[in-house]
Amino acid sequence: MIKKFVLFALLLIPVGAFAQEIKIAYLNSAEVITAMPEYTQMQDSVQKMTSAVQAELKTMEEEYALKYEALMRESDTLVESIRIKRLQEIQDIEQRANTFQQQQQQQLQQLQESLFIPIQEKLKTAVDAVGVENNFTYIFNATPNLLLYINPTSSIDATPLVKRKLGLK
């Protein structure tokens, strides 16, 4: 779909060239985003949450291992009803751990998405401003699957301009 849009836009260029000068630039958005301090903060927040989740899962795993080992040691001497009760406790720990892991994975994804939205908005604002300031007709994102070829001698790389607009190096 994106390739069709780019092809369509490129086909319109000769038609519009008679009416006005067309300035096309490209941008490496990944390079800009990873240089933003907000991105580093997002990564730190995600890492803190991931570490906390891993610590809790480790605690659950240790509890599971202790109860399982105790059950195996005492299995022959336990009354059937107690053995069944302890086995149920072990299964409950396993189920809690699985549920906890799934819930935390969803929360981690939601956190990442909520922290990434302002980064995207800030980038878009900067790209829009650079486009207006430099009178660009188009600024394409230079992702590997979108632009098949960029001639560095006749194309304008807007990445440094956007970085400068955002105060990045």
Image (spheres, grey):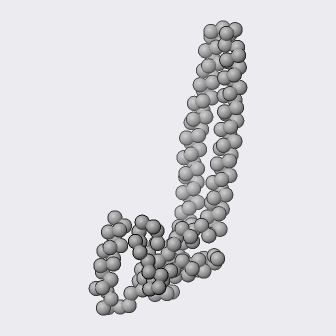
In the rendered picture of this protein, how many numbered marks are placed on residues?
0
Answer with left or right where residue 16 lies relative to residue 102: left
Q: In the image, what residue occupies the spot 67% across and 17% down?
A: 72
Classify 21 as above or below 161.
Answer: below
Q: In the image, what residue occupies the spot 55% across and 51% down?
A: 109
Q: Residue 144, how many percent across, how many down?
A: 45, 67
Whether residue 136 is visible here, answered yes or no, is no
- Image quadrant assignment for residue 39: bottom right
Answer with left or right where residue 120 lies relative to residue 54: left
Q: Residue 54, how many percent across, how many down?
A: 66, 43
- Image quadrant assignment for residue 90: top right
Answer with left or right where residue 45 lies relative to residue 33: right
The answer to which of 153 and 13 lies nearer the viewer is: 153
Q: Quadrant of the C terminus?
A: bottom right
Q: Residue 95, how many percent across, how many down?
A: 57, 30
Classify 43 as above or below 135.
Answer: above
Q: Residue 93, how many percent across, how many down?
A: 62, 29
Q: In the image, what residue occupies the spot 52% across and 75% down?
A: 125
Classify 79 as above or below 28.
Answer: above
The answer to which of 55 and 81 lies nearer the viewer is: 55
Q: Quadrant of the N terminus?
A: bottom left
Whether residue 44 is visible here, answered yes or no, is yes
Answer with left or right where residue 91 lies relative to residue 17: right
Q: In the image, what residue occupies the spot 62% across and 10% down?
A: 81
